[in-house]
Image (cartoon, rainbow, N blue to C red):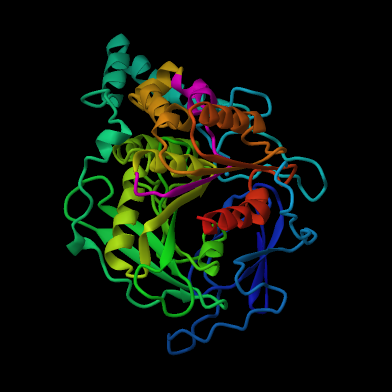
Amino acid sequence: MSESSAGASRVRCPKCQQILQVRRQSEPTRVKCPQCGVVLQIPAASGDSNATGSPSPRPPKPASIPAEDPFVDASAPALPPADYSSSASRSNPYAGATRPNQQAMGRSDPRQSVSGKPPARSRGIPKWFFFVVGGMALVPVLCCGGLGLVGFIGARKNASKIVPVVAECLVLAPPPKTAFPELGVPARTFPSGVEAYSVRIDAPGDTAGHHMQMHVLLPPGEHENASLPCVLVAPAGTPMIHGVRLTESIDYVDEVLPYAKAGMVAIFYSIDGGLPESVNENNEQQVMTAATKAYPWFTASGAGVVNGRNALEYAIAKIPSVDPNRIYSAGHSSAGCLSLLLAAHEPRIKRCVAYAAAYDLEVRMEDMTSNFLMQQMFPGIASFIRQTSPIKNVGRFTQPVFVFHAVDDGNVPIGDALRFRQEMEAAGKELTFEQVPNGGHYMSMINQGIPMAIQWLKSS
């Protein structure tokens, strides 16, 4: 539901019912709800073409909408300035939560609502998933008896149940330099002077990581060669069985723009195995069917590590201002897992940042990995989750790591972060651990975590 005003529209989030005020665009775009983190599809504004069919000028932005924010919470009070002086202190239909206060990792943000009441939390894999999967298994039984079930199981298995480990995935060669396009012209320039470019890699063949999208954000001004650090950021929202696509439109960059404004090159990159845009996320069977098709691509990319490695290769090859000795990784929630995993397997990552990551995927996704039907739908899932769990890769870190977590995170319990800290310190790894008392899973990262991490990165 939406209602338009001059230059802006008021849109109701279908998940949390929050009213958002969004800028009208001449083309369809997407924004992220600041209340729950759900990505909303915003249709193109009507009346943006004149009688000749050429685009009419975009209406001026209302003064009430910040120039660099793609959305404005129209009803929530303004957040107070974050206090960084103290160091003491997205929903996913697949990742299983095994504790009452542990919500599945993904796009939703279980921070306190405007009313002060926390939104309802998911507990484990939703029941609909088992009904749908079970129903699919029951159909061949009813039609063909026991042989039908055997056929169903066999059809869901790959030729081999072996899922390649991350180290094996990295043996895959990156795209040839000839497949790396030039930056070209900026797709968007922010009022701060930060320029954003949209880059698509399409290399020959079906090798993992050879077809991916990147948004490259450059700090304002001219820069000498090898003079700038570079931060590689993956999108959150993967339940660790499929990836995340990016679109050509640079619509929201809340988790990337601050690095560029702070004087760093920031690269936002896609993860192989993303669900098609045509998939209706409210249609469980569509999501499940698409996820089973995306899963082999996601595993072949090492949960996105190959994509991160290729983004690094692109930065070195095509962005002269990037200092190869100051390339970092960063990410939130599921992207925090990928940031840790990339750093653990890629020694060229000199520093690693993880905000509210799920550190022990085996515990988090136990409901899925121990389920027989899930094992048939996603072959090798238990082994894959074990190999890509950050806590299982502690021994591989060779660079300093920064971990940020909010005590009131309703998605990933603070205890998980503390246990990861304990494992890192016991292994003698260099870890900077910052926790804050509140802010929830998402907004604590936006308001406090990113500024803290930027200062930490600049201290290198």
- Give me the residue at 48% from left, 44% from top: 400
Left-right relation of 105 to 81: left
For residue 56: magenta?
A: no
Q: Is residue 252 something one can see in this rendering?
A: no
The reply, left or right, for residue 408 in relation to residue 174 is right
- Residue 89 to residue 76: above or below: above
Residue 397 appears at what percent x and percent y? 42, 37
Query: Percent x, y for residue 49?
Result: 49, 83
The percent position of residue 313, horizontal first and vertical second, equals 29, 56
Left or right: where does residue 280 sit relative to residue 103? left
**Residue depicted at x 65% and y 32%:** 413
Q: In the rendered view, would you say 432 is above or below 325?
A: above
Q: Which residues are magenta?
A: 347-369
**Residue at 66% of width from left, 63% of height from top?**
2
- Any part of residue 424 in sight: yes
Q: In this view of the protein, which residue sits in the foreground, 281 or 64?
A: 64
Q: Nearer the viewer, residue 397 or 214?
A: 397
Q: Is 354 part of what is drawn in magenta?
A: yes
Residue 390 x %, y %: 46, 33
Q: Quadrant of the N terminus?
A: bottom right
